[in-house]
Amino acid sequence: MVSVELDSLLTDLDDGVREVLSSSPTVLERSDPDLNDIKGAGSSTWLKIPDVVAVVADLRNSSRLGTGRHDVSTAKIYQSSVDGAVKVFHDFDANFIDIQGDGGFGLFWGQSAYERAFCAAVTVRSFSSLLVKQLESKYGGSGSFPETGYKVGMAADRVLVKTIGSPRDVAEQEAVWPGRAVNHAVKCAQSATRHQIVVTESLWNHFKENDFVTTSCGCSNGVPGSDVTDLWKEFEIEHIHDEDYRHGYVLESPWCKKHGAEFCSAILAGETTREITEQARRALQLNQMRAALETKRVRRNKYPR
Ligand SMILES: [Zn+2]
């Protein structure tokens, strides 16, 4: 039977808080650190990474997927979905991967961090469709099976990191990443619906001039011949409470069956410009202008002078 000296435990906890609050931790800045640079639970040194991109994969309705099902099928659903997302983070060389019950997150920093993170996000999005197709064909289509699929969130910021937990027990330690990168990426994912990638405005700003990211290849379901269109829409990240950070963008498209591999390599290679006819570019700008005018018009209707 477990025996706990409750009074002395609470006194220790109280002392622990006082000790941490009165200490002045050292902060060590590294732009491209190795995981071994992260300080252990016994250390008072935090590592600061100035630019980290977080990609969160959150399985929609995960808590309902097991209801009324055998343990084995629930376990298989979790395993296939989480295995897939983690493999994507791994293959795009995430610097850190955190696995959770129904998804997880990948953190990217250093060389082409934004590009690796974005390609990983679109790949999780593409995997989401493959996953749902198989789950529905095995366990039943709409209605008999809770609507599921990955919701993806992305954000970037500086982060602090340190391992926290029981100083002498590695199994009870974990790296923590306070800061807006992970927090806002989680909120982007929560605000999304399945098969969507939601990103913060600062993340979007990194890509807004990149033709491979902003503009479609001109296919419809992998068949060329359609117009080149804008891929992103403006989006309110409703789970972020701070008004300054609520404005974001959403992408719904997976990789194109025909051009996905080519676009992915181009993005990873740092390419940003594609051959798009002047006429098609004008159409895109017109779309943007139209959207702006539309917003203005709606505002005017709402607040007549
Ligand atoms: Zn295409």
Image (tube, rainbow, N blue to C red):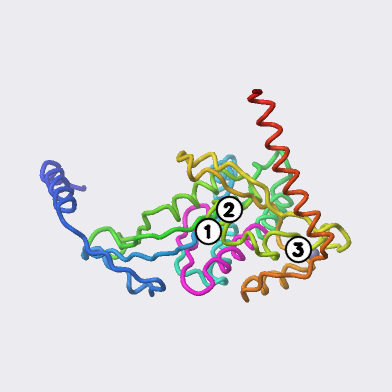
Q: CA distance from mark 2 to mark 3?
A: 18 Å
**Label 2 sits on residue:** 152
Q: Is residue 128 left or right of residue 63?
A: right
Quick one: label 1, few (<14), some, or many (20+) residues within 10 Å?
Answer: many
- Residue sitting at 78 percent across and 70 percent down? 275
Residue numbers of the magenta segment: 98-126
User: Mark 3 touching mark 1, by CB under 8 A?
Assistant: no
Q: Quadrant of residue 144?
A: top right
Disc 3 element: loop
Viewer-proximal residue, 63 or 241? 241
Residue 182: give its label.
none
Label 3 beta carbon less than 8 Å to ligand 1: yes
Query: What percent of the width, then of the height, locates residue 155?
Result: 51, 55
Question: Would you place residue 16 above or below residue 95 in this image?
Answer: above
Query: What percent of the width, then of the height, locates residue 145?
Result: 67, 42
Q: CA distance from mark 3 to mark 1?
A: 21 Å
User: Ligand 1 is found in which quarter of the picture?
Assistant: bottom right
Which residue of the protein is positioned furthest toward the front in this rendering? Answer: 305
Query: What percent of the width, then of the height, locates residue 114?
Result: 54, 66
Q: Amino acid at mark 1?
A: Val
Residue 256: give its label.
3
**Label 1 sits on residue:** 55
Question: Would you place residue 297 above or below residue 119 in this image?
Answer: above
